[in-house]
Amino acid sequence: MKHQMKKTGHASHWRKTQQEDIQLLRMGESPREHEHVTLSQLEPERRLQPPPLYQLPLPTQDPSETQQQTQLQYVLQLSEHQHQTKPVWMNGRRLLLLLLAFSVCVAILGLTYYILQNFQSRSNNKATTEGPCVSLACQWASDRLAMSADPFTQPCDYFLFTCGSDRYTSKSRGVQRGKTIPGHPQDQKVTVASLQERDQSKEHGLRDNDTLDRRTTLLQYLTEMLESADRPGSTAVQKARQFYLSCLDTKSMETAGAEPFLALIQKLGGWAVSGQWNQTDFNSTLSMLMKDYATFPFFSLRVGRDPNEITRETAKRYIQIDQPDLLIPIEWNNKTQKSQAKTQTLRPFLASCQRYLALLGSPPSSSLIHVGAFISLSSELAVAAAPLHHRLSKGQLYQRMTIKELQSRAPAIDWLRCLQAAFYPLPLIDDDLVLLHNLPYIEQMSHIIGKWLNMHELRTSGPLHTYMIFHLLHTLMPALDSRFSETANNLSVALGYSERVAPRWEQCVLETERGFDLVLRDLLRERTENRKVEEVVQNIFSSFKAKLHEFRWKDQNSLQFIMKKVQSLIPKLWTTNHISSAAELDPLFSKVSVGTNNFFSSYVQLLSLWQRRRTKLLTEQTNPADILSVTSLLLGNELLFPMGMFVPPFFHPAYPRAMNYGVIGFLIAKDILHLLLPDINSQSETVRAVGECVWAHYLSVTQKAGQAGAFSLSAAQQQEVWVQYSALQIALQAYSQTLKEQPGDTSLSGLSQTRLFLTSFTQVNCDSDPYRQFMPLEPSFLVTVICAKSDLCPTKLQCHNRTEQYTLKTC
């Protein structure tokens, strides 16, 4: 009897197992399939197989056929197991068991037919969502991937390339990598020749396909919009495009030479350099330069809020007055706590000023007198200027006073008259408030101007007027022939500055945005898929919040402090709710006449547009979106992501999600971590620990582990390594979550989902941001750190040429 009960128990257990498997088949899952495991749940001691969503069939294999074969094999195994089970005892119940077995077989066959039909339908639907992406955007992206080096074929060569070294051609990948380790004796810098070669390629319309610099990419995208002829657009759009094209027409500018500027000088009353000057009133000339030509020789103007007014909704915008950008090179003396002109730069600066006057037709015999007066006046004003850190320490920023009070402190300037001109047609009065950022400079500047106005022997030479004309020349230099810009560049070289000179197409985009920002803003918004952008932003932010719980915090209060701050943030796309129509934009630009062969005239009108833009900014209550912004920012409790981030090749609504999350998802996560880094770093031990862990991986590949102490990271480098490594994890987790919620994704170049994600990430390389200098290794190397202890990666990234292998922990 006991023996019979034991066998009955075995049969009951077998039937229960069979029913569970059949239930799994009804749900469309493989029997005993592994549950999905995210990257953060992988334990170093427990090596699980990759989740099913990463186990895609080979490109040549039909996914539906594979799944059907698996289901049929399992059903046949069940049937075979059932037929092979022979009873060991015979009694009156044998007939009943045979009937029951026959009924089970019929049920299994019926269920199999239903499952196969249902699975066929589901597989067909799945194949349509997991097929290759064939849009034009994807074809372009696929071609771009094909021209780039594959990081998974030679990981040791590819991933050892550091930020700042020679990365401008795909041919260099795998050649120079590993030679720019910080502190390494073989450290090499970028050669001047490589930089010049890159700039020349861009000057001829070629784009740098190996480095995705956010700002350059946005400017290239705006260029394509301005050069596009597929849609004529409104009158305002046509004027913006004509302005850009006329800016590119350097031949016309070379033909015109200095004549347009000389004609403008005569309109302003002439000047003493040419011997023809009608001694115009100082404040009349100054107010005209501020109103019509956006030129501020003696002080600068901007519009902004007072940070002391915390409530953002009610914060008012103020006119803010600061020291100007002086043309003469100056330096700060820590001993005297004063600025001064650099004595070693006076000779090349004098030569450049003389060259400008020669280009404007001034004879050498008389130019030296005017240049000497200009340098003398500039040197006096330089003494009153001070760097930002000094003004901060002295509390000289955001000093509030009325225009009337300012007039009494700096009487040489007719402040109400000049400010009314700069913000025409706003009805400013003496009681309006302004904010000062260096009141001692403003007072000293007024004293200097008054002194020069009262020098009777200099009245006929007009040094103050000449000083203003020199500043006007620098304002209009982008619209003059190349001899003027070459003179400015030669001075920069003589002063030891090595700043990159932007190519002409880039300068023209920036100048076009300066006057036609409203037009470009709406063009950019029309091409941005807001719904998909907001979806990516929200998913990355959710993954970031989940990641916070994995960090090691000092105590529970630390986590609660960070979570409270994070929960108060509102992530959103930084744009305007109102889309301007042609009926609204066209009247704004109705007075602008853009010619195809007279860029100087168009540029002067652009400066007038800029004045109106500044005036409108003073009265607006909302924060206008900056079209040239490419990184997220915190404004109150709003976490804003500008539209300029979401342009190809970083993002496109037609791309596979793996590609979008591998690039823009990583950049969004990196920006969020940078914004909240001070709070997280002060409350968590994870930043330092992860930075050191990733660096240990890097050293294990680049040199012997015993030499790890020789190349330690600074605190800033540890933080940047942690930021980028965590950002990659957050983006990958966010993408994995989208696959759970929306199964299926299109493919590109035959790559699996994970490989496309990681390959897309490697295309970002060293993103250009203020923290780039602190990244001690190639960000692509972070892929090897993730793949070292995870089965999520499509292939093992091992260095076969390394004789020593080190066992490293998961970071």
Image (spheres, rainbow, N blue to C red):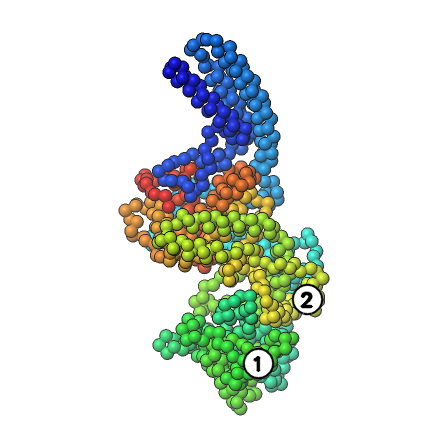
Instruction: Compare marks 2 and 1 and give the one earlier in the sequence.
Output: 1
User: Residue shown at 58%/34% (left/top)?
Assistant: 126
Residue 283 visible in rendering: yes
Q: Nearer the viewer, residue 149 or 123?
A: 123
Tell me the tag on residue 431. 1
Nearest the viewer among 770 and 152 is 770
Residue depicted at 52% across the width and 56% down the height: 570
The amino acid sitting under disc 2 is Leu
Give the vertical position of 768 relative to 296 (above or below): above
Mark 2 packing: few (<14 Cα in 10 Å), some, or many (20+)?
some
Which corner quadrant of the image does residue 40 belong to?
top left
- Rendering coords of residue 154 (x, y %): 43, 41
Side of 439 where 584 appears, left or right:
right
Provide residue 644's location: percent of width, then percent of height. Answer: 56, 56
Q: SS for tag 2?
A: helix
Question: Looking at the image, which residue is at 57% across and 23% down?
Answer: 111
Secondary element under disc 1, as helix, strand or loop, is: loop
